[in-house]
Image (tube, helix red, strand yellow):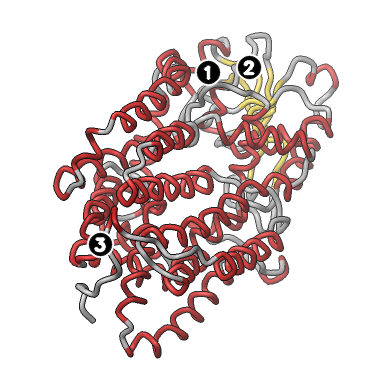
């Protein structure tokens, strides 16, 4: 198959075909129904509990994220208090929107019904892009926003309608309230444009007005970060250290590519090649370099392998368009098994397994599954340990947890059990508040005795929390301690033990 296969009229003069509403809508509908069927599976994921807790401490910024996810969690909890399904509805909606946008990208490249359907199917069968729609997470919102931004840029290349660049700036401003990753996209895109054009993109006033909108929207967040010692930068260093402990370059690249799924990987690789080689896609060559630079940038800076996944659909769409246009005979035979296997992999990635068939955690990446179990048991064990102390001992005491997951979970159960305030020095939770200096005793959930004795005069084991399917150290094999007489006032001790 030749990458020089052409499609009608390149770039600005290209007339796009009609949008395949019925076919793309069917893919989006099936995907949405599949996600909806599993939204209530298991329990809250640890991060979701943290978002709910952060929603109780609304702020213009946080140590480890922007304010949008806590705001969404707070809004959904007000609409349907305690509802797991309601909390995850926004994740479902943006994932379905991403599927539609993937098809729209293929249309912008001149692809007809077949290419649009193939592009949408690639997004919908990606185990990562699809499965993330089953729970609320920063990347669940971040990735579709990247897809929308790339769509606006691609459409601008075709139409030269500058309002699209303005809207790209607005979407970027929104995305900056989720994660601080999108600047990497714009930097890599600028390099790609300088290398391959269209350089006129960088001279458009609308682009810089959009950038100004983003900059102004970030002023409150930047002021908060400056006032708290720039914890977002510290969080980036923490993520980098985590990635170093996981593995090197080969594993990073393997995980980054596998996030595309089977069909998605085929279209991703072929699409990048076509963006560089196909004459019909010549005006969009900068996107091929952008994708490669992004993966490299996150590799070098210690980012997570899935950080660049939001830019994959533009290459998938390009690959789908050129593959359909080529009409190669072998694709007729390969299409059915590849698509079929991709559908199976996508379906397998969803949390459909009966609880009875799930094996206990072995540690590692299974936290995405086992991080949804054991929270009721943790709460019950915490309450039992707290009630084991006399009323006099409990007076003025607070609860402190080793991890932000545990703190979010206990905050979620706090009203039910009538506990005092819950604190944690972990991640963004450490910035929600400091235990009062009057708290001479704490119920400490998690942690090790040797470490705790550095900060308290008396440390006594008073309980244990465990769950067969819980995650080690979070809801499985967790020791609960009664700690008395902090060695220094909390106002001095807290900054020392707070960690990202």
Q: Is residue 103 above or below residue 395?
A: below
Q: Is residue 13 above or below residue 30?
A: above
Task: Tell me the quadrant of the picture where the C terminus can be found.
Answer: top left
Q: Residues within 10 Å of mark 3 (few under 14, many from 20)?
A: many
Q: Residues within 10 Å of mark 2 (few under 14, many from 20)?
A: many
Which callout, 3 or 2, points to the residue nearer the camera?
3
Q: Secondary structure at mark 1?
A: helix
Residue 241, image x, y percentages? 34, 41
Residue 198, image x, y percentages? 20, 46
Task: Tell me the quadrant of the picture where the N terminus can be found.
Answer: bottom left
Task: Give me the disc on residue 435.
Answer: 2
Residue 109, image x, y percentages? 35, 61
Q: Nearer the viewer, residue 63 or 96?
A: 96
Q: Nearer the viewer, residue 383 or 409?
A: 409
First-in-chain label (1 vs 2): 2
Q: Residues within 10 Å of mark 1 (few under 14, many from 20)?
A: some
For the residues labelled 1 and 2, say whether their Cβ atoms are less than 8 Å apart.
Answer: yes
Real-space CA distance between mark 3 and mark 2, rounded to the nearest whole angstrom? 59 Å
For the residues labelled 3 and 2, say whether their Cβ atoms are less than 8 Å apart.
Answer: no
Task: Give me the disc on residue 281.
Answer: 3
x 33%, y 36%: residue: 183
> Across the whole image, how many numbered discs are drawn on residues?
3
Q: Nearer the viewer, residue 155 or 67?
A: 155
Q: Is residue 261 above or below residue 137?
A: below
**Which quadrant of the structure image shows residue 354?**
bottom right
Which callout, 3 or 1, points to the residue nearer the camera?
3
Q: Nearer the viewer, residue 38 or 311?
A: 311
Q: Would residue 76 appear left or right of 269 to someone viewing this image?
A: right
**Which quadrant of the structure image shows residue 235?**
top left
Q: Secondary structure at mark 2?
A: loop
Q: Which residue is mark 1?
A: 494
């Amino acid at each position: 198959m030749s990458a020089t296969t052409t499609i009608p009229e390149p770039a600005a003069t290209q007339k796009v075909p009609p949008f395949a509403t019925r076919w793309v809508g069917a893919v989006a509908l099936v995907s949405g129904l599949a996600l909806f069927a599993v939204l209530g599976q298991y329990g809250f994921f640890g991060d979701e509990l943290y978002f709910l807790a952060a929603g109780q401490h609304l702020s213009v910024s946080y140590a480890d994220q922007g304010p949008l996810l806590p705001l969404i969690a707070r809004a959904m909890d007000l609409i349907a208090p305690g509802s797991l399904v309601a909390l995850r509805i926004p994740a479902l909606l943006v994932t379905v929107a991403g599927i539609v946008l993937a098809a729209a990208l293929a249309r912008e490249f001149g692809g007809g019904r077949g290419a649009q359907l193939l592009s949408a199917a690639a997004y919908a069968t990606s185990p990562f892009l699809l499965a993330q729609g089953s729970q609320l997470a920063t990347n669940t919102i971040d990735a579709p926003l990247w897809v929308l931004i790339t769509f606006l840029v691609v459409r601008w290349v075709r139409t030269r309608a500058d309002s699209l660049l303005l809207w790209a700036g607005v979407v970027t401003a929104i995305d900056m309230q989720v994660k601080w990753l999108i600047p990497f996209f714009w930097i890599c895109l600028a390099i790609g444009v300088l290398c391959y054009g269209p350089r006129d993109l960088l001279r458009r006033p609308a682009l810089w007005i959009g950038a100004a909108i983003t900059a102004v929207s970030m002023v409150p967040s930047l002021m908060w970060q400056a006032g708290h010692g720039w914890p977002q930068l510290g969080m980036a260093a923490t993520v980098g250290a985590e990635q170093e402990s996981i593995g090197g370059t080969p594993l990073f690249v393997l995980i980054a590519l596998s996030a595309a799924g089977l069909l998605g990987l085929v279209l991703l690789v072929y699409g990048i090649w076509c963006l560089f080689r196909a004459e019909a896609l010549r005006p969009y060559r900068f996107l091929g370099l952008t994708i490669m630079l992004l993966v490299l940038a996150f590799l070098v800076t210690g980012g997570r392998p899935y950080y660049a996944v939001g830019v994959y659909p533009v290459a998938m769409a390009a690959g789908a368009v050129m593959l359909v246009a080529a009409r190669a005979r072998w694709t007729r035979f390969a299409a059915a098994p590849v698509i079929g296997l991709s559908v199976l992999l996508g379906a397998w990635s969803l949390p459909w397994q009966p609880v009875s068939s799930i094996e206990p955690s072995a540690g590692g990446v299974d936290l995405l599954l086992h991080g949804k179990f054991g929270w009721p048991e943790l709460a019950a064990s915490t309450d039992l340990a707290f009630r084991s102390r006399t009323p006099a001992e409990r007076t003025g005491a607070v609860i402190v947890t080793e991890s932000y997951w545990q703190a979010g979970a206990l905050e979620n159960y706090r009203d039910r059990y009538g506990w005092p305030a819950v604190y944690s020095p972990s991640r963004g939770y450490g910035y929600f508040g400091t235990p009062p200096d009057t708290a001479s005793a704490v119920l400490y959930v998690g942690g090790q005795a040797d470490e705790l004795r550095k900060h308290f005069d008396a440390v006594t084991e008073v309980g244990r929390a465990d769950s067969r399917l819980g995650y080690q150290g979070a809801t499985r094999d967790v020791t609960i301690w009664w700690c008395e007489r902090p060695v220094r006032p909390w106002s001095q001790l807290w900054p020392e033990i707070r960690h990202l």
